[in-house]
Amino acid sequence: MSNDSQGSVKGEAAMTLSPSGSASSQGPPLSPSTSKPQELPDELVQAGWSKCWSKRENRPYYFNRFTNQSLWEVPVLGQHDVISDPLGLNAAPAEGGDNNLGNGQRKRRVSEEQGAGPNSFKRSKVEPTTPISPSTPGVKPWSSAPEEKQSQSTTPTTPSPTPAPIYWDLDIQTNAVIRERPPANHLPPHPEIELQRAQLVTKLRQHYHELCYQREGIDPPRESFNRWLLERKVIDKGHDPLLPSDCDPVISPSMFREVMNDIPIRLSRIKYKEEARKLLFKYAEAAKKMIDSRNASPESRKVVKWNAEDTMSWLRRDHSASKEDYMDRLEHLRQQCGPHVAAVAKDSVEGICSKIYHISAEYSRRLRHAHLSLLQERPPAVSPEQQRLVYCYPVRLALPSPAQPRVELHFENDVACLRFRGEMVKVNRGHFSKLELLYRYSCIDDPRFEKFLSRVWCLLKRYQVMFGSGVNEGTGLQGALPVSVFEALHRQFGVSFECFASPLNCYFKQFCSAFPDIDGFFGSRGPFLSFCPVSGSFEANPPFCEELMDAMVTHFEDLLERSNEPLSFMVFVPEWRDPVTPALSRMEGSRFLRHQLSVPAYEHEYRSGSQHLCKREEMYYKAVHGTAVLFLQNEAGFAKWAPTPERLAELLAAYRTSSSRASSLCSPGPAPPGDSKAVISLTC
């Protein structure tokens, strides 16, 4: 029986909602629906049960998303718990014959209970749409049905495990309204192409490492390649979802700034006096060596040599200096030598940025040629945007997906492992179930889940490649707010949408993300900078890339200027003040700013960007920088979701609740990119 629990709702007077249609068609987007309030105990909800409404029989029923069971009566976990006992081995024996069938009974329609009439016919059994690899028939699905084995009353009962915590709420409906969009012209994802992309991005990272070491004698700044990808995609007009190929200017300001910042040496965090002394000596020595080996002007050679030799002389004769004395001397040396060192390194660093970009463009061209050869159709012409207002819906692709190759799935304890051509990606069981739910809610071209595993593999591989393979690399760029804060935002400010998220770290099922070609199957509305809502309440916690945050502010102000409907953005950005970032400065001076508050460092936390893989005790980490929370709203949005003292108190209380968690870890977190002064002045 189809799940028809969703009922249509009335739109606002100023809106025209799209008509209802078939869930498997490529027609107009469905109008959003409001789900009924939760009426089941938490134990049943965590076991996969939800209460739905049957339009055919005009009565409620209960559906389990893990086993695809449907029951008229309220499920009873005591008879069969699908989480702790999926095969039904420990189910209690039924009492009273057929009057107590428990959760194993099959839901029957009223017409079946009345008996088959002369015109009735026997319905064929519908197999559950459990996602398994299409090329491996007979493989057991990961959520086994309870009828696979008979109950054995002689088996000793075992206590149920503690339910895993849930870090999302996919039942919240959206209040974001957009203009109806045509299907996107992105090429549909394919594991073969994703594997080639992963190999080429890995080679590009290696080229970057080699160029930095050969030309400047340094390792690439940490996370600088990841921030380069983010900054380039802000202006990139190319076709590849990850590799930049059509950018103006060619020289990346982000990469140039971060590489220059590590010349002549990288300045690290200082804890002790001896470390400060050693760092000062290394800087003076490296600056002198660099100015001697480059084509510098006589004035530059004179200034750098004199300051470097003076510093070394001071270090040799003064052994009683404190850590602060060394740090002050280092800052003075940087101010004197820095401009001259930067002048001689400028052309070389620009060459690094240009070389990496042109290699990326060539890789992008190769990938598109290979991708088009797999497809039977070519991308159609771009259709004009419609004027009809609808509630936001996931990205739809204009091109049909080609046949997908086999992707193998197995579980190692609580980790799902997906393998394609020897390349394995992993995700914990909870997030794997979350991806299944998002796919069920959002995908309209694969009702039998035949392409589910290949698309999950592509999704996991894409994010793995984007954030790198180093320890904790990229996790700071994909951190998320605590669950308690999301709950407060939804309860107090009507927030139902995330402007910067992914299928792996989203809290709501409606969000914007970086990769519409693959994320759209899991609920993404596309990149935020190309998403144009007319009304709604939004949360924005962008990756900490200065160029991306600056473009975000421009987009905010443009949307708020054009809309007369209620529109509100709650923005969470790092409170970097030395120097202040352009994005934060612009928001603080915006005419749409209604309120601003600051959450101090070490008094709040973030969810890890690797939450789909990390251990439960590593899920949260303390923020080592303050977080600025800014409320940008137009007049109608301020009237509807005003940041009143009561609402702000609830939000701060949610932060205090999350920060009191005993398992929170202290993480270095992201430092302001390109700000050496801030880096060297941090102490633990």
Image: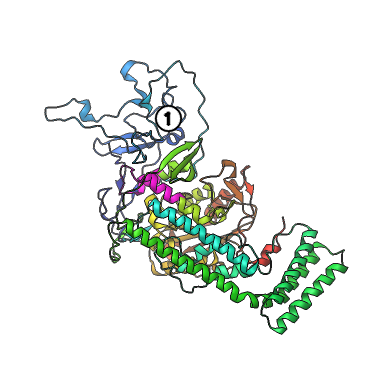
- Position of residue 428 measured from the top left corner of the image (x, y, whole percent): 49, 41
- Position of residue 409 measured from the top left corner of the image (x, y, whole percent): 43, 40
Q: Quadrant of residue 52?
A: top left
Give 511 or 407, whichever is nearer the viewer.
407
Quarter of the figure with the C terminus: bottom right
Element type at marker 1? loop
At x 76%, y 77%, the residue is: 305
- Position of residue 630 measured from the top left corner of the image (x, y, whole percent): 53, 62
Colour treatment of the image:
rainbow
**What secondary structure is the stretch in magenta mostly built from?**
helix
Left or right position of 673 against 238:
right
- Report whether residue 503 is seen: no
**Within-10-Å neighbours for mark 1: few <14, some 14–19, many 20+:** many
What's the residue type where badge 1 is placed? Val
Left or right position of 18 against 577:
left
Considering only vertical position in the picture, is 615 above or below 239?
A: above
Residue position marked by numbered label 1 in the rendering: 82
At x 60%, y 66%, the residue is: 212
What are the residue bounds of the magenta stretch? 436-460
Considering only vertical position in the picture, is 367 above or below 64?
A: below
Count up the numbered dots: 1
- Report whether residue 345 is seen: yes
